[in-house]
Amino acid sequence: MRILHVEDNPGDSMLIKEAFSEINNECEILQARNGKEALNMIQAKEVEPNLILLDINMPVMNGKEFLKILKYQDDLLHIPVVVLSSSRAQTDVNECYRNHANSYINKGDSFDDYIQNANAILEYWNSKNVGPSIH
């Protein structure tokens, strides 16, 4: 399973990578620092993710802008997107779902929260049968 993690905070990137490797070392976690970098990587076919983990508060192109572009391009809209954000604002949640995010998860504050998030993401992946089963 190839996951593109779109996140500008190196600490959060490290925590999500560690959480997934602790749960399942078959997950390949690729990084992009903002929506524009992620979009460029995907459009240039540098990466073909099975799943995108997306922060919404980033410089250059934020996650909400990225969703608006990704989910309205016929050749890219099939890629599942899980928003992984520290924002608990209902307006952010609603906007992400309006722009076809598949799920919205709060980051949490501890490594245990990241482990729980990684488990929830893998359970979601497996329950939706959007790709190969990952355990």
Image (tube, rainbow, N blue to C red):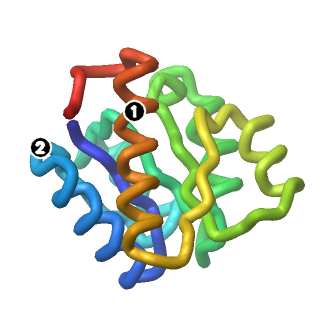
Three-letter code, disc 2 = Glu
Query: In the image, residue 101 lies at what x, y percent?
Result: 63, 38
55 or 37: nearer the viewer: 55
- Report x, y in % for residue 62: 64, 65
Q: Mark on residue 26? A: 2
Choose the circle earlier in sequence order: 2 or 1. Answer: 2
As measured in the structure, the alpha-carbon distance from the residue carrying label 2 to the one carrying label 1 is 15 Å
Vertical placement of residue 54 versus 74, above or below? below
Identify the residue at the far right of this view: 91
Q: Which residue is mark 1?
A: 123
Establish if 36 lies above or below 15.
Answer: above
Name the residue at 52% across, 40% down.
Answer: 81
Would residue 62 be visible to someone looking at this image? no
Q: Amino acid at mark 1?
A: Glu
- Where's residue 15, x and y in %? 33, 73
Q: Quadrant of residue 106?
A: bottom right
Count residues near mark 1 (Cα–Cα under 10 Å), then give few for <14, some for 14-19, many for 20+.
Answer: some
Direction from residue 89 to residue 96 in the image, left or right: left
* Above/below status of 15 relative to 69: below
Q: Which mark is residue 63?
A: none
The residue drawn where x is 37% and y is 16% is 129
Task: Assign a secondary structure to mark 2.
Answer: loop
Q: Residues within 10 Å of mark 2 (few under 14, many from 20)?
A: few
Q: Is residue 64 above or below residue 131?
A: below
